[in-house]
């Protein structure tokens, strides 16, 4: 860096690239990020006046339950898979984990059907809908691997029952539900990472596109799929 | 977290309602403290989960072991062991991904199991019966003798012995000393062979044999779980807990817990014809569920399906305040707004 470079350096808080830097990958990614997510969109303190129903709370409740699942899961991971079978505190944390999962699906299903009946994919929000539904489907897999990683009668029963379904698709050859080690790693690492990524993208898409407009009433000609 | 106070936007509500659906909303707004809402939601859900955990806990019934099974139901254990030996057990004739003894399930002309092939090799005769007995033979010469007699026999001779032993087994019973006695028959070394396996199982050594790994550390329970799943013992235990397939199966848990309630649709297909009695029920149910999942994912692109919300008035309930304000504004336009 030369003295001239230092002299022309602009305010580091300015997202716009310096003259000549426009083609740099970093400058382009920063520019795209700032255009897609200006601070007012990323963390808004205002919402359209129609965002005034109890149904809107279920999205954030789902995220909140996911946070509790991750937090209780981290405690269980720290002490290892056998701990909760021999410790009352461990059993309590396992119970928190279980009930957070139950709440997560309860909130998520209400959120999903609420958004369905609001046709929330309208206005270039298809990707928001798709990431939401895929998050739900992957979450079912994440919960399932948790149930078969419990090392108790439930996990024995569920795994031996489920193997036939998974095997019938051909997937059982690489996803062996009877292999505790494999299922535990999917449960504590791979699937949570996928769910967290999908939920993150979903939330960013909601922030980028905003909350879907109300369906028009009286003489509407708007196509809910547009 | 929002307040009910409406703040005017740069355009009226009527004008905003006519905005394209992908346009940023510039109509009236409300204050909405997103960070506060997320924080409160996390605290409330955490407290709710903690209270539910405190009052209801979570199920943790001890796993079933082969040792428990052989001690509690030696007749069932011996019958299952015989079925592994003669190839009639579920695992022995399963097909891919465990072996080539079965064809696997088919969806029309396609069998994904066959296409993928064997990836988790299982030979029930060797893995469940002979290999554990060979280890036992190192310390118990009598086991080595019956093993040698069995191995030296022809396939036809082995079949005859297995048939005769299978006929005698249902007449067997537990003696006063706890041993299981099978009436004499022309079954060669089989009584000695399977009784040695029963002894091995009673001691817990068979649990260890089937879970053992050549690398000392082991986390794969495929073999003991397949062996247990061939038994009547595990099935009876599941049925007693209302967990069998006809009882909505694996979506439930032991005790009165909600289990995986979100699997209700998946489990439902097993309760209705033709899946209820189909040999290909699993692959049929998976195909149905994959179809439903794809429909749900691609709802925005499917005419008819994506129009349902317009005809179900749930949205009128969700946005009732908005529609009310919109109607009121049309009757009494805000000061300064142009006439219609």
Image (cartoon, coloured by chain):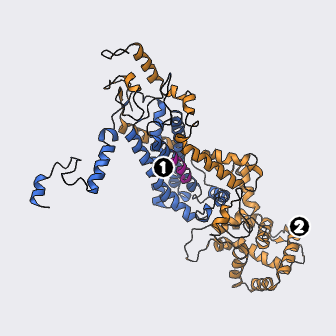
Chain colours: A blue, B orange
Q: Position of residue B20 (x, y in %)?
A: 41, 31
- Extent of the magenta region: A133-142
Residue B301 belongs to magenta span: no
Residue B19, x across and y down, in percent? 39, 29
- Per the image, label 1 sits on a secondary structure element best described as helix
Residue A30 is left or right of residue A157, and the answer is left
Which residue is pictured at 48% across the width and 29% down the height?
A215
Contact? badges 2 and 1 (CB < 8 Å):
no
Give the quarter of the figure containing the N terminus of chain B.
Answer: top left
User: How far across and how far down the image is residue B44, in percent?
Assistant: 45, 39
- Residue labelled with disc 1: A69
> What residue is at 71 percent from the left and 70 percent from the top?
B100
What residue appears at the point 30 percent right and 16 percent down from the top-left corner? B336
Q: Position of residue B54 (x, y in %)?
A: 53, 45
Chain of the residue on which disc 1 is drawn? A
Q: Secondary structure at mark 2?
A: helix
Residue at the spot of label 2: B171
Given residues A220 and A100, the one toward you in this image is: A220
User: Considering depth in this image, is B291 or B160 the residue closer to the camera?
Assistant: B291
Q: How many other residues sit within 10 Å of disc 1, few (<14), some (14-19) or many (≥20)? A: many
Q: Is B216 left, or right, of B189 in this rendering?
A: left
In the rendered view, would you say B309 is above or below A87?
A: above
Q: Chain of mark 2?
A: B
The answer to whether marks 2 and 1 sit on the same chain is no
Q: Quadrant of residue B138?
A: bottom right
């Amino acid at each position: 860096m030369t003295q001239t470079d230092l002299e022309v350096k602009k305010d580091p808080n300015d997202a716009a690239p310096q003259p000549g830097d426009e083609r740099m990958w970093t400058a382009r990614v920063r520019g795209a990020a700032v255009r897609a997510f200006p601070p007012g969109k990323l963390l808004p303190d205002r919402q359209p006046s129609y965002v005034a129903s109890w149904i809107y709370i279920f999205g954030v409740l789902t995220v909140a339950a996911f946070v509790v699942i991750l937090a209780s899961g981290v405690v269980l991971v720290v002490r290892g898979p056998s701990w909760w079978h021999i410790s009352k505190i461990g059993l309590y944390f396992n119970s928190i984990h279980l009930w957070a999962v139950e709440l997560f699906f309860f909130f998520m299903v209400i959120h999903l059907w609420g958004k369905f009946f609001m046709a929330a994919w309208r206005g270039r929000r298809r990707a928001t809908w798709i990431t939401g539904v895929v998050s739900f489907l992957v979450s079912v897999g994440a919960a399932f691997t948790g149930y078969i990683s419990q090392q108790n009668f439930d996990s024995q029963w569920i795994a031996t029952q489920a193997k036939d379904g998974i095997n019938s698709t051909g997937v059982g050859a690489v996803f062996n539900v009877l292999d505790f080690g494999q299922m535990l790693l999917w449960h504590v690492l791979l699937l949570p990472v996928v769910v967290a990524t999908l939920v993150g993208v979903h939330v960013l898409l909601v922030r980028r596109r905003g909350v879907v407009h109300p369906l028009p009433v009286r003489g509407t000609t708007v196509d809910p799929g547009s | 977290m929002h307040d009910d106070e409406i703040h005017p936007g740069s355009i009226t509500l009527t004008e905003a309602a006519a905005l394209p659906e992908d346009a940023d909303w510039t109509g009236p707004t409300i204050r909405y403290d997103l960070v506060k809402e997320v924080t409160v939601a996390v605290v409330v859900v955490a407290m709710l989960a903690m209270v539910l955990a405190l009052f209801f806990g979570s199920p943790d019934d001890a796993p079933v072991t082969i040792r428990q099974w052989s001690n509690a139901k030696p007749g069932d254990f011996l019958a299952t062991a015989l079925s592994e030996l003669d190839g009639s057990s579920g695992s022995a004739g399963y097909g891919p991904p465990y072996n080539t003894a079965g064809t696997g399930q088919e969806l029309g002309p396609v069998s994904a199991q066959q296409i993928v092939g064997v990836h988790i090799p299982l030979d029930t005769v060797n893995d469940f019966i002979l290999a554990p007995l060979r280890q036992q033979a190192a310390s118990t010469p009598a086991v080595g003798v019956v093993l040698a007699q069995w191995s030296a026999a022809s396939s036809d001779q082995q079949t005859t012995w297995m048939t005769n032993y299978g006929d005698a087994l249902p007449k067997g019973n537990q003696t006063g000393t706890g041993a299981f006695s099978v009436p004499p028959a022309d079954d060669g070394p089989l009584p000695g062979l399977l009784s040695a396996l029963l002894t091995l199982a009673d001691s817990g050594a068979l649990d260890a044999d089937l879970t053992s790994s050549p690398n000392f550390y082991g986390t794969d329970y495929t073999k003991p779980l397949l062996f247990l799943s061939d038994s009547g013992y595990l099935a009876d235990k599941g049925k007693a807990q209302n967990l069998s397939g006809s009882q909505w199966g694996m979506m439930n848990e032991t005790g009165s817990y909600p289990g995986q309630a979100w699997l209700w649709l998946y489990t439902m297909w097993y309760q209705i014809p033709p899946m209820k009695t189909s040999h290909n029920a699993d692959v049929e149910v998976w195909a149905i569920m994959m179809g439903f999942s794809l429909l749900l994912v691609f709802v925005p692109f499917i005419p008819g399906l994506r129009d349902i919300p317009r005809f179900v008035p749930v949205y009128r309930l969700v946005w009732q305040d908005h529609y009310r304000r919109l109607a009121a504004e049309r009757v009494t336009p805000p000061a300064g707004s142009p006439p219609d």
